[in-house]
Image: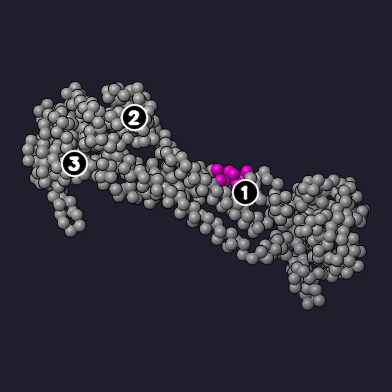
Amino acid sequence: MTRLTFIAKNSLRNGRRALLTVSSVAVSCALLVTLLTLQRELTVPPESEAASLRIIARNKVSLAQPLPAKQLATIEKIPGVVAVTPFTFFGGNFRDETVTSFPQFAVDPARFRELLVEGKIIDGDYVEWVKDRTGCLVGADTVKRYGLKIGDRMRFTGTLYPCDLDLRISAVFQGTVDDRGLFFHHKLLDEATGDLGTVGTWYLRVASAEAANDVISRVNAAFANSSAEVRAETERAFQMGFVSMWGNVKILITSISSVVVFTLILVTVSTMSMAIRERFRELAILKALGFQRREIFSFILAESFGLACLGAGIGIGGAWSFWTFIDLQSLTRGFLPYFEVTPRIMATGATIAALLGIIASIAPSIAVGRMSVVDGLKTLD
Amino acid sequence: MAMADEPIVSIRDLYKLYRQGEIDVTALDNVSIDITRGEFVVLMGPSGSGKSTLLHIIAGVDRATRGKVLVQGINVANLTESELADWRNQNVGFVFQSFNLIPVLSAFENVELPLLLTQLNRRQRRQQAQAALELVGLSDRAHHRPDQLSGGQQQRVAIARALVTDPVLIVADEPTGNLDAKSAADVLSLLKGLTEQADKTVLMVTHDPKAASFGTRSLHLEKGEIVAG
């Protein structure tokens, strides 16, 4: 027998309690990891290198307010702008769906290739899309999710615009941070809506990241004091603006996570205290046999730490497996394109569990440390 | 090297006061005794007479209020908690009324437990634990857990655990209190054999005159004082 086997046998002496303790830590860790991942997905939008070169210009009043299409000529002439396209959110429901499960945007295909630089698209297919006014460019995730292929038709019921769309898949893109989107000809939207002469936003690409701030200032200045002032910002800033519309998600999720951790501490401390209190007699015997206070503390710590880490391993590993292998698009109906349980989040969960194991061992250790051998022995006979 | 007739335990003017609420209770009052190597000393007396307190102080699990406790020339009262724990491991074997084996460990592992504190390697620990179990006649029950053993067998395992570190002193607090007559006789014979064949010194607390008859000397305590022996 070694000290390790002694600790292991003590840890598992009450199988049901050990199972329940490990399970409570595992479930709590899985929940904690899920919440932290959700917080990350909602508050830190995915970023690509190309995103730093892209700017979105929207109506200064509100994102819901359109911009005049005639602004294109002015924006094109601004120094530093490499490409620009209208970028209008359609927000239609696919087939019989009742929600917009993936985004659709009306763009100018002839200009859009310059903006979607990281997207991998077969050149011939892209040319076909440019030629076909009813064609669309679809993200590979959406194609896969609905079992689509080039040539298939996609029907959308408009929710923001009083028109429906019937599109044909011309090309597929992949390799971006979000391969769910669908892009179609802005001219088609103009025709369907009676050519309102407006666009939702402008999507720009600049020559270099250093030039971005200058371009933003110039775009804003170009339409200052006009009937349609614009607010230009980087793609990332634009996404963060969307996130802020959720309210303070971060505080909400942090609050829930804190409650989870606090409850977990209470459960584990209580369980460990109970387990040690039942063994006061045995611990007194260990002391009588010559085990030092620090050795008994190390036994209690190892037991508590071991159970917490086992629970954490199962919970965090389970959460990682679940979110890695599940069909997330189906589960969230397209709400979350990604749900990546990062090593950092897993390390956070493991660290909290490890601290939990240490904290849970403190109270029982103090109680045992204070107990004299005689007092312990008095409970024996 | 100590002479054979030199006391292995020497107690002088020992006092032990307990505080119960606002009242001081004298558990031991001016006790002085000498115990030599190989003796089987029995402590008798009514409940509350101080016999268990005396046993605990000699074994180093309790401290005297005043007086000197020398075991093999070491004044136990001067040792720190940490030193005392080491000293107990090397010099004292404990046998309790309720056996007090660790229920999740086998008989063999229970015997091996005190050896985890020694410098012995795994093979040496196994050899010593095996030898101790053979000495008490339970090598065939080595892998049984305590709940798979009779009371008498459990107490013999406890004696093996007390012996395994080869201590000079074995203290037994009512070791036959929970045993039937035959098992009690077996256990007492075993303890007596240790004094006669292994030159161990045994200090036993008991209420039972029959058990006391196995000892080489009996000390009677009343109200904290030795009144006979």
> Circles 1 and 2: CB distance less than 8 Å?
no
Give the left or right position of residue A145, taking residue B93 as reference: right
What residue appears at the point 67 percent right and 62 percent down from the top-left corner?
A243
Coordinates of residue A82 in the picture (x, y in percent): 81, 59
The segment highlighted magenta reads: A314-321
Q: Nearer the viewer, residue A85 or A375?
A: A375
Instruction: Report how far apart the C-alphas of labels 1 and 2 lie in the structure.
Output: 52 Å
Instruction: Name the residue carrying label 2.
Output: B149
**The quarter of the displayed image where residue A12 is located:** top left
Disc marking residue A146: none
Residue A341's label in the rendered image is 1
- Residue A55 x, y percent position in the rendering: 75, 62
Q: Secondary structure at mark 2?
A: loop
Q: Chain of mark 3?
A: B
**Label 2 lies in what chain?**
B
Chain of the residue under the numbered disc 1 shown in the image: A
Name the residue tied to disc 3: B52
Q: Nearer the viewer, mark 1 or mark 2?
A: 2
Whether the residues at callouts 3 and 2 have beta carbons within 8 Å, the answer is: no
Quarter of the figure with residue B194: top left
In the figure, B47 relative to A184: above or below? above
Relative to residue B201, is residue A311 depicted above or below?
A: below
In the rendered view, does A135 fall on the left or right side of B206? Answer: right
Total marks placed: 3
Dominant secondary-structure state across the stretch colored magenta:
helix
In this image, A343 relative to B35: left or right?
A: right
